[in-house]
């Protein structure tokens, strides 16, 4: 393996100091190679050093304006900074430059969702889920976007699929509980809220939902006993 490959491998193994050493050597040896800067930027992202990461991705773009993954990296920097509109622009540029992975569709969708535009986010999140059918996060966020625009039955099916992929997904259970309440099925809703709390005892929303349903069921029992 060359220095760049050694750096990427070390990063995959979470050996960040070792990765930094190899990537620094790769940049010193081949200062005109954009991939070394891109991967060093990715390493800095992992270390939450966003300003430094931005500089490395910008250097890569200067060396190669067609480097789609450098634009994706810049999108990731601004997404982490909470600058979702700017991040969206970079992710869209990455897509225009040829990046067709589920990740880029997912991130464009998430930028739109974070800007409170779930209807616009929906096709991107749907596409991400289609391209990466085992990606739990993409499918879950797709379900949330559906729920946000009132497509409750479709959201229900998506959350069920999330649980097929990851049975202990507390947020999927919580959202299924909400859907069950929407369909006037408090017993099923309670079961989902309780399961969410088994998985994540500090799930505040599930705790609130459980309390609400229990109060509802108590009121129904009082009416039945009159």
Image (tube, grey):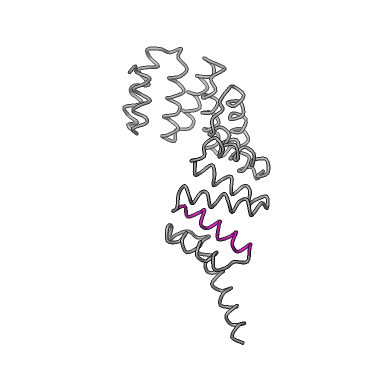
**Secondary structure of the magenta portion, mostly?**
helix
Instruction: Kindly indicate the quadrant of the structure image that contains residue 88.
Output: top right
- Residue 130 in percent (x, y) is at 56, 38
Task: Point out the image quarter for the N terminus.
Answer: top left
Number of marks in the image?
0
Task: Point out the image quarter for the C terminus.
Answer: bottom right
Up the image or down, 210 lies above or below 26; here it is below
Q: Nearer the viewer, residue 210 or 82?
A: 210
Instruction: Kindly indicate the quadrant of the structure image that contains residue 129.
Output: top right
- Residue 67 in percent (x, y) is at 53, 20
At x 50% / y 24%, what residue is drawn?
A: 57
Is residue 217 covered in magenta? no
Is residue 180 covered in magenta? yes
User: Left or right: where does residue 54 sit relative to residue 9?
Assistant: right
Q: Nearer the viewer, residue 83 or 150?
A: 150
At x 53% / y 52%, what residue is drawn?
A: 160
- Residue 203 in percent (x, y) is at 48, 58
Range drawn in magenta:
168-183
Up the image or down, 83 lies above or below 140; here it is above
- Residue 142 in percent (x, y) is at 59, 45
């Amino acid at each position: 393996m060359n220095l760049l490959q050694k750096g990427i491998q070390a990063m995959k193994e979470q050996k960040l100091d070792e990765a930094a050493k190899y990537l620094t050597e790769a940049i010193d040896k081949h200062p005109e190679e954009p991939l070394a800067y891109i991967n060093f930027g990715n390493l800095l992202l992992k270390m939450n050093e966003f300003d430094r990461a931005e500089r490395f991705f910008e250097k890569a773009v200067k060396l190669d304006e067609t480097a789609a993954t450098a634009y994706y990296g810049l999108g990731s920097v601004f997404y982490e900074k909470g600058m979702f509109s700017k991040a969206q622009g970079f992710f869209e540029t990455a897509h225009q430059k040829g990046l067709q992975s589920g990740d880029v569709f997912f991130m464009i969708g998430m930028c739109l969702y974070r800007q409170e535009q779930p209807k616009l986010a929906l096709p991107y999140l749907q596409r991400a889920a289609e391209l990466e059918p085992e990606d739990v996060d993409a499918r879950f966020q797709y379900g949330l976007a559906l729920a946000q625009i009132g497509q409750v039955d479709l959201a229900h099916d998506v959350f069920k699929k999330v649980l097929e992929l990851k049975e202990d997904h507390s947020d999927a259970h919580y959202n299924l509980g909400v859907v069950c309440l929407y369909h006037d099925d408090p017993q099923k809703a309670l079961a989902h809220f309780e399961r969410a709390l088994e998985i994540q005892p500090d799930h505040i929303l599930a705790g609130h939902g459980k309390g609400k349903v229990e109060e509802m069921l108590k009121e129904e029992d009082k009416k039945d006993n009159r």
